[in-house]
Amino acid sequence: MALSRPDIPKKLAARIRGAQARVQEMRDTLVHCHKRRLQAQAELDLFHLNPEAYAAARYGNHGVDSYPVKTRTTRLVEDVDYRSRRIIEIERDLPGVLEALATVEADVLVEVQAMRPTTGRVPWPKSLPPFEGRITRGLNNQQRNIDAEPARVAAHRARLHAQSAREMAKLDELSWTCRTFVPPQVLL
């Protein structure tokens, strides 16, 4: 589009910002769906890798065939399926929304050029940031978080174990002090 855009009335700027908000909402939804699908698929892959270990780690006393494990895995499968369908829908609809934004901007530009100059105008709204690479960057960050999760959990458990050991040492010291405590002789 043109680099120099005229100042426009607030009402027309609101139309452009509304169309931009619809585009941004679709973009954000697309990124969110990709991230959620990746999370659900990673957890589902973890289950399929070793169902017994998954059930023991996540649900303690419940087996692989228990209600909570079956429910969770079924919901994960449904979530992956839903997110995949939703991504296809959004990718199909996004060009139409971008086209609508371009149409709104063109209509506003034509309307503004036909108007007399008046006061009370605002600058043309800033263009949306580029979307190319955003999904890839988001998915790469998400995958790094998923890959780092076991190490993060292990470090957290190590900190808890160390804290527990320190507290047990203090309690042992206090119990030794209580065992060796000799009450003072009471004077009668």
Image: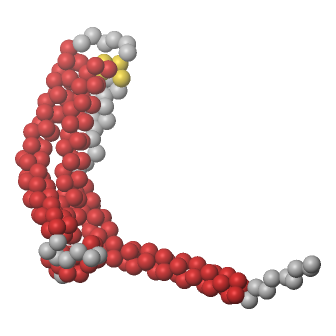
In which image quadrant can residue 129 be found? top left
Compare residues 187 and 151 and report the one nearer the observer.
Answer: 187
Residue at x 80%, y 82% (from the top left corner) = 183
**Could one spot residue 166 in this view of the protein?**
no
Percent coordinates x, y for residue 180 in the rendering = 74, 89
Quadrant where the image shows the N terminus: top left
Compare residues 76 and 181 and report the one nearer the observer.
Answer: 181
Work out which residue is located at the far right of the displayed protein and give it. 188
Percent coordinates x, y for residue 71 in the rendering = 16, 64
Residue at x 72%, y 85% (from the top left corner) = 177
**Could one spot residue 107 in this view of the protein?**
yes
Determine whether 15 is above or below 126 in the image.
Answer: above
Residue at x 12%, y 44% (from the top left corner) = 94
Percent coordinates x, y for residue 69 in the rendering = 19, 69
In which image quadrant can residue 49 be found? bottom left
In which image quadrant can residue 22 be found? top left
Compare residues 187 and 106 and report the one nearer the observer.
Answer: 187
Compare residues 47 and 33 and report the one nearer the observer.
Answer: 47
Residue at x 19%, y 54% (from the top left corner) = 33
Determine whether 1 is above or below 107 in the image.
Answer: below
